[in-house]
Amino acid sequence: MPEDNGSRADAARSARIGVTLAVASLANYLAWLGWDRQKDVAPDGGVSGPYQPWQVAGFVVVLGVLAFLAGRYGVPKSGTLAVAGVTWLAWTVGAATSDDSGLWAVGSVLLLPAVFLGVGLVAFLAARSGGR
């Protein structure tokens, strides 16, 4: 039985896009959030951080663009897995290695469905509105 070269080409294209999105997602995390581990101490002794609002906003905007591109390039499923999976993993590793309280695990559990639902929604809407 002859092999379908179109399916192979589609699979290779999908894999290339997935790897590119995964690398871009890691770069997004590192550029906006991964470098900041400094907690801020207020004059009253309250502690916040490590992220500033502008960092999170920039991170989320780029995350949305990556999700949109996954949909537009016609790979909403694998794109969501690549973008959301790498984002979640990068945040979890960063938090686990910098948090002594153990609360990173709670954040990781809360982030997992949120990032997959958010990225997936954007990717699937982009695919429905005119993906390739």
Image (cartoon, rainbow, N blue to C red):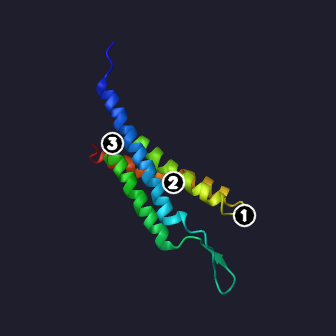
* Residue in the picture at 42% in, 41% down: 77
Front residue of 53 and 34: 34
Query: Considering the image in quadrants, where does the N terminus appear?
Result: top left
Q: Disc 1 to disc 2, how far (Cα)?
A: 21 Å
Image spot of residue 58 (x, y percent): 43, 67
* Residue in the picture at 57% in, 57% down: 91
Front residue of 60 and 126: 60
For label 1, the residue is: 100
Query: Considering the image in quadrants, where does the C terminus appear?
Result: top left
Kindly give the residue lying farthest to the right in the view shown. Answer: 101
Front residue of 16 and 63: 16
Q: Disc 3 to disc 1, how far (Cα)?
A: 41 Å
Q: Is residue 64 above or below residue 19?
A: below
* Residue in the picture at 46% in, 57% down: 27
Give the mark nearer the N terminus: 3 vs 2. Answer: 3
Label 3 crowd (10 A; few <14 / some 14-19 / many >=20) = many
- The disc labelled 3 sits on which kind of residue? Gly
Q: Which mark is residue 87?
A: 2
- The disc labelled 1 sits on which kind of residue? Asp
* Residue in the picture at 46% in, 73% down: 54
- Element assignment for label 3: loop
Confirm or deny contact between disc 3 and disc 1 (CB under 8 A): no
Give the mark nearer the N terminus: 1 vs 2. Answer: 2
Q: Is residue 24 above or below residue 11?
A: below
Q: Is residue 33 above or below residue 110?
A: below
Q: Which mark is residue 74?
A: 3
- The disc labelled 2 sits on which kind of residue? Thr
Give the mark nearer the N terminus: 3 vs 1. Answer: 3
